[in-house]
Image (tube, grey):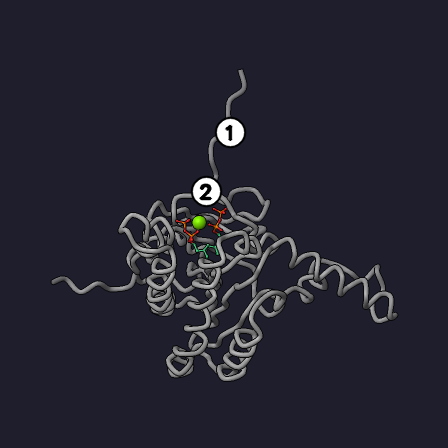
Amino acid sequence: MTPVEPPRLPPSRIPAHVAVVMDGNGRWAEQRGLSRSEGHWTALARMFETVDAALSVGVKWLSVFAFSSENWQRSTDEVEGLLGCISGMAGQHADEIVKRGIRFRWCGSPEGLPGALVEDLHRLEKATASGTAINCTLCCNYGGRSDIVQATQKAMEMAKAGRLDPEDLNEAALARLMFTRDLPDIDLLIRSGGEQRLSNFMLWQCAYAEITFLPDLWPDVTRELLWQAITDYARRERRFGAAPTTAKPAHSVH
Ligand code: IPE
Ligand code: IPE
Ligand code: MG
């Protein structure tokens, strides 16, 4: 069997921050006559493979969307199953996360989450604070719009208390008040499951993200597909509003 090697990419072309919307677990399970929750458990195993895939190419920041602030609309059974998976990760897999040198962060609101889960997430953040292999952020009970609102509320409270002059509020100052405060902007966003939308994920942080939509359901996403997405990213020209660097013939006007 041919050994599967990670792509060797010039360091300057490797995305520093890759974010993943892990979508398609429910459909994957339903296609196999399994419960949607079983799809979420399979997804959890894939998450560790994703961390390895990112690590092996030199990605330093990996953020994954595990439970959105809108996912509360699902059945009680499914919500319990989903939060159970996340608890399992934060509880049962905590030692493995520490051993791998992963620096773990949680982004999201504690509101509505079981207290024990919030404690486990905080405990894991503390236990991995000195991890240097890769920064992994789990977005759980996270919504992009509510992140912007809660940051704005904090800024208004600071202004009311005289600790912030409204004139000093700029993009960097607001970004420091978000759940994602320590994270760089997202370079590459990958969404599995075939849907081509953001679903309220990191709206602010994705301002200039390159986006790859994979048709594959998340439990079917292999490390090779992730490597391919990163290799494609390395070939893209990011412009941030500037003119293209490669000279192209001007369009002729008739
Ligand atoms: C993504 O898979 C996981 C979460 C939303 C938490 P889904 O559960 O949305 O799977 P599909 O999109 O219904 O197949
Ligand atoms: C996005 O998937 C949320 C997560 C992957 C956690 P959804 O399945 O909730 O998104 P929609 O509802 O299809 O937009
Ligand atoms: Mg979905």
Of callouts 1 and 2, which one flags the residue occurring earlier in the amino acid sequence? 2
Where is residue 188? Give x, y as percent: 46, 55
Disc marking residue 35: none
Of 157 and 118, nearer the camera is 118
Mark 1 or 2, which is nearer the eye?
A: 2
Q: Nearer the viewer, residue 95 or 228?
A: 95
Figure check: 91 above or below 200: below
Amino acid type of disc 1? Answer: Ala
Residue lying farthest to the left in this orientation: 1
- Residue at horizontal 38 percent and vertical 83 percent from the top: 99
Q: Position of residue 87 (x, y in %)?
A: 46, 72
Residue found at x 38% / y 59%: 37
Give the structural element (helix, strand or loop) at label 1: loop
Image quadrant containing the N terminus: bottom left
Task: Report the front residue among 54 and 89.
Answer: 89
**Which residue type does callout 2 highlight?**
Gln
Residue at position x 33%, y 66% from top? 45
Q: Position of residue 200 (x, y in %)?
A: 57, 50
Q: Position of residue 31 (x, y in %)?
A: 29, 48
Residue in the image at 54% along x and 52% along y:
73
Which residue of the protein is positioned furthest toward the top in this rendering? 254
Mark 1 is surrounded, within 10 Å at the Cα level, by few (under 14), some (14 to 19) or many (20 or more) other residues, namely few
| Count of all numbered marks drawn on residues in the image | 2
- On screen, residue 156 versus residue 95, left or right, reads right
Q: Is residue 110 above or below residue 194?
A: below
Q: Is residue 175 above or below residue 243?
A: below
Q: Answer with left or right where residue 194 lies relative to residue 164.
A: left
Q: Which residue is mark 1?
A: 250
Q: Is residue 209 above or below residue 250?
A: below
Other residues around mark 2 within 10 Å, as few (<14) / some (14–19) / many (≥20): few
Q: What residue does disc 2 label? A: 196
